[in-house]
Image: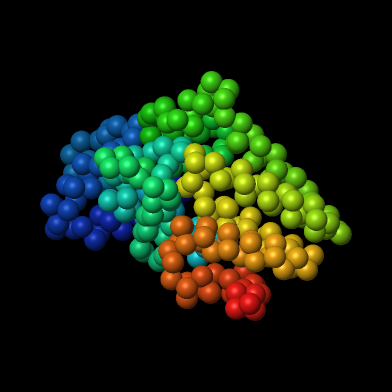
Amino acid sequence: GDVGDALLSQRLMQNLSGQAGRLDLLLGMSRGTREASVDGDAAPCVLLSQVVQANRHMASAPWEGPPRGTGLWPTASKLNHACDANCSWHTVGDMFFIRCQRNIAAGEELTLSYINGTVSLETRQEVLKSRHGFICGCGLCKEQDAGVASGKRQYEAVCRKIQACESKKKIDPHEALKLQTTAFETLEAPEYCSLHNAQLEHAMAACHRAFELRKEDVLKKWMEAARCAFELHYGSHPGVFELYAKERGMAKLFAQYSTK
């Protein structure tokens, strides 16, 4: 938010005091739709604030948890946007990780999504225009503008059904498993490859329901799907996945059935 942006700008100015070269590099970054409006000694502060507002990323608690702050990572900020981005990102402390989420052709541009691709086309374009000063023309936007792509509407609908199902006093595990499967499969579309973190959550929920139903073969299938989605987004270190499974309260389940 505005307070976090202001604090980050202030911290950067303090840390870069006497380092004109590094400060100039930051001030040369994109400022989106913002224009400098102050001259004189205060100008660098205004410019840096505009750079931060246009380029900062939220730092979250582990596993895409609640926001814990905001940061400016210049290298990551150089990647352009696409709603159907081919890379995903996450933070660990002050570290910023970017991973390709599908095969990348030689010479193909690496892209990040500045906004969730399952948000409506109208909302995405409004946010991108107001904050960054451009209208996205990626393949997903073109298809949705032409009325071709329906995955977003399907995903929104199934997420609403999942919420309704999970809010019942007595949850039907068969229905819950079916809905999680539909949500997971909707995100299998190539244009949503940067959302493997969301796929992971659906896979973990499906594991829980399959275990409730005592469907061991189905459970193992979803465990494998969860591991694959995790590795694409977070990396393949087994110890990291164990930490994630423990956080989700499913470490014993994975340990038990992974060895069978």
Residue closest to the eye, 54 or 40: 54
Identify the coloring: rainbow
Q: Left or right of 256: which side holds 230? A: left
Q: Left or right of 136: which side holds 213? A: right
Q: Left or right of 77: which side holds 255? A: right
Q: Residue at x 37, y 58 (%)?
A: 97
**Quadrant of the rendered structure where residue 59 is?**
bottom left
Placement of 238 over or under 111, stated as above or below: below
Residue closest to the eye, 166 or 207: 207
Q: Residue at x 49, y 46 (%)?
A: 193
Residue furthest to the right = 170
Residue closest to the eye, 251 or 3: 251
Q: Residue at x 56, y 45 (%)?
A: 188
Q: Position of residue 166 (x, y in %)?
A: 77, 55
Q: Position of residue 60 (x, y in %)?
A: 48, 59
Placement of 100 over or under 190, stated as above or below: below
Q: Position of residue 10 (x, y in %)?
A: 31, 54
Q: Residue at x 42, y 53 (%)?
A: 89
